[in-house]
Amino acid sequence: MKSKRSFLVQLQILTKRMTLRVVRRPLAELPNLIISAFFLFVYDGALGGVFGGNASGTPFDFANGNFVNFILPVSIVSASLSGAASGIYLVEDIESGVFKRYQSMPISRWAIILAPMNVGAFRVLLQAGLILLIGKFIGADPAVGNVGFLIVLSIAFIWGMGFAGYSVAAGVKSGSSQGAQAATFLFFPAIFLAPTFVPREALKGWLETAAAYNPTTYVIEGMRSVMVQGWEPDVLFRGYLSACLFAAITLTFAVISARKATEKA
Amino acid sequence: MLAVDVKNIKKTFISKQDTVEAVKDVSFHVKQGEIFGLLGPNGAGKSTTILMLTTLLSITEGSASILGIDVATKDKEVREKIGVALQDTGIDNLLTGHELFFTTCRLWGYSKKDSEVRTNELLELVGLTEAADRRVKTYSGGMKRRLDLGLSLVHSPEILFLDEPTTGLDPGSRRVLWDEIKRLRNNGVTVILTTQYLEEADELADRIAIIDEGLVVAEGTSDELKASIGGDVITFAFNHNDDLKNAKNILTNSVQEKNELRITVEDGASRIPGYLKDLSNQGVEVSSVSANKPTLDDVFLEVTGYRLEGSESSQQAKQKSKR
Ligand SMILES: Nc1ncnc2c1ncn2[C@@H]1O[C@H](COP(=O)(O)OP(=O)(O)OP(=O)(O)O)[C@@H](O)[C@H]1O
Ligand SMILES: [Mg+2]
């Protein structure tokens, strides 16, 4: 009666189960989505007038006449933070004992850990996708054409998986969902110690230095290049590279800590 | 072949703060088709033992095998054979009973169609058919325990580990679970359960190991354990403290519990007149006296030096006799 259990089938079953958990708590999706949309509307409303079309011909015309294009990457970076839910999902299972139950069954431990990562990835795509849609609706218009949206989404995805890895590592390490939740505090330095509202050239002093060391800077600049300037391979490459490096580092930590967690004490 | 064979296992937890010897030396074996009870107080090492046998904790020293398969080296094979319901029920509150069973069936490798059939079978078995489409969050404690038991049965395991399956249940729900466990045993499943309830061990387990502070201090059937004490327990009760004190001096081999004295002797009933005479000669007034076969409670007192909390006698006895 029992058929062979492959890793992929297990991963699919566990991902589906985890997705059900997310769907059952739709309200949990809202805060991050609202904050991201909030950035878009409020900053566009507050600064769009100054740095948007009116700025043309002035030294402040860094948005090339469309401030939505300029600020959208900030919203997207904020939306990609939703990947941090992965760690929270995983730790919830550890706390509830579900994790132990799975461990007592002949299931691949990687399937147990990858399932919440999968769902975190979906979540990033969904939230970033929604923000892009809103952005398009209020006038975002990538300098490189619509393919720009896809490029932005792909960078957001990698960046979001970086947050997922970070939250899994932090959650497993602290063993509590608060630990995983604390991961989201990264948000503040990541977003505000970066050329969020103006280009890096306009930052000064310590903030300029901090931004130079903040990988978010390059991610935002990479996204901005396709939104505002057009094809700038080196800037775009730096964006992908920062996102990939960040993701590689945090995912490595996630794997190490998750392996420890699934090892027998 | 033995269902479970445990040889001198030991578990030491080492952390920065301190070292805990949770299990010092535990050995026992379980035959196929029996219910084996691990009886012990809080902190005795019951859960730690179960976690080691179910491959969730490594064994520091010693060895254990399940149906002849070594637990330490062949953990994957062992997991195929066993069903596990841990003390902290690993239950997903956001899903419904039906979804939980279905997911677990799928994880055990059943096809979608077979999973549906098996899910309904198990829901029926543990009496959750009506509540199947409700989220588990809304289940009572008893329902969650039954769900937990059901989830451990999905793959029809030959060996079932239950860590305190009835803790926190009312007597009615407890009885329902006992009947279910007995029915499983009658169908050939070997059950290893832990409990801190004497009645549960007495009623349910074919054989019992009493575990205390990480050591097995007695093992056998309930009757064997009771017989091991030898003879009967004579209980003297007193209305006045002075009488109790004097009687204690006279009955030198007695053990005090609250306002009672107990003596374990062969052929208790015929010894009572003699004791009563000795006591009345010294002017001690006895309010009541009785001779009984020893209970598991008495066995526990004998082998550990204190009574199990929640049993008829007090916790004071525990502290006193431990000093
Ligand atoms: N991971 C751990 N690290 C350190 N000490 C532990 C750990 N797990 C258990 N212990 C200690 O080991 C001892 C035995 O614990 P265990 O959980 O096995 O007892 P138990 O018999 O199941 O008790 P209870 O009836 O309360 O469930 C306790 O003193 C406990 O504090
Ligand atoms: Mg326990």
Image (spheres, rainbow, N blue to C red):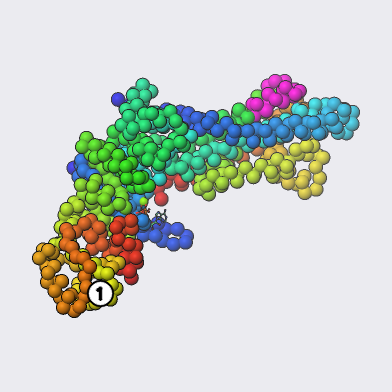
Note whether residue A227 is visible.
Answer: yes
Q: At x 40% / y 45%, what residue is drawn?
A: B88
Q: At x 33% / y 58%, what residue is drawn?
A: B309
Relative depth, front residue between A79 and A202: A79
Q: In this image, A215 relative to A122: left or right?
A: right
Please say if B287 is above or below A51.
Answer: below
Residue pointed to by mark 1: B243
**Residue A134 colored magenta?**
yes
Q: Quarter-wise, where is residue B106 in the image?
A: top left
What is the three-letter code of the residue carrying label 1?
Asp
Residue B250, image x and y in percent?
20, 76
Q: In this image, A178 relative to B37: left or right?
A: right
Please say if A179 is above or below B119.
Answer: below
The chain identifier of the residue carrying mark 1 reads: B
Span of residues in magenta: A128-147
Please say if B119 is above or below B248.
Answer: above
Task: Say what secondary structure mark 1 lies in.
Answer: helix
Q: How many marks?
A: 1
Relative depth, front residue between A148 and B313: B313
Would you call the spot at circle 1 few (<14 residues within 10 Å), some (14-19), or many (20 or more)? some
Residue B221, image x and y in percent?
18, 51
Q: At x 16% / y 58%, what residue is drawn?
A: B293
**Residue A135 colored magenta?**
yes
Residue B239, image x and y in percent?
27, 69
